[in-house]
Image: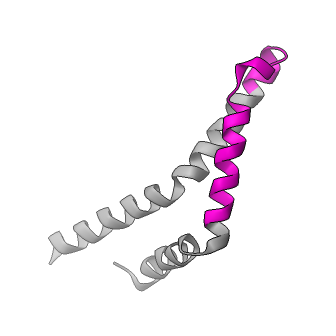
Amino acid sequence: MKKETEEHYNRYFDLFTNDGWKQLLEELRQNALSINSVEAVKDENDMHFRKGQLNILAFLLNFESTVSGIFEELQKDDAQDI
């Protein structure tokens, strides 16, 4: 793995250990619960807007596992190249 690529992922891993990241994820989870309620939907446009919000929240909430999975795959590829 290139040094730049490894540093790129290490910066993410540093972020994920930060208390601020954990706090942000908890707030995003709480927001997702309220946004995911169909009771508050006013009309079709509001529903589509909420769907977009949930899509972004899901991306952020799953970002850590996505980054970890990609990094593990890169490591496996490197191990196979040896």
Q: Name the outermost residue toward the top.
A: 43
**Above or below — where is 41 with respect to 19?**
above
Residue 74 magenta? no
Q: Position of residue 41 (x, y in %)?
A: 79, 19
Residue 43 magenta? yes
Q: Name the outermost residue toward the bottom.
A: 3
Q: Position of residue 25 (x, y in %)?
A: 63, 56
Residue 46 found in image quarter: top right
Q: Position of residue 4 (x, y in %)?
A: 47, 82
Mainly helix, strand or loop, the magenta region?
helix
* Residue 25 or residue 73, whichever sits in front: 25
Q: Residue at x 67, y 39 (%)?
A: 32
* Residue 21 or residue 4, whichever sits in front: 21
**Above or below — where is 38 with respect to 35?**
above
Range drawn in magenta? 22-48
Instruction: Give the total of numbered labels.
Output: 0
**Above or below — where is 81 with respect to 55?**
below
Q: Residue at x 44, y 57 (%)?
A: 65
Q: Residue at x 41, y 63 (%)?
A: 68
Q: Name the outermost residue toward the right.
A: 42
* Residue 12 or residue 5, whichever sits in front: 12
Q: Residue at x 48, y 79 (%)?
A: 10
**Above or below — where is 28 with respect to 70?**
above
Q: Position of residue 75 (x, y in %)?
A: 28, 71
In screen coordinates, is 37 left or right of 15? right
> How is the structure coloured here?
one colour
Locate the C terminus by quadrant: bottom left
Locate the N terminus by quadrant: bottom left
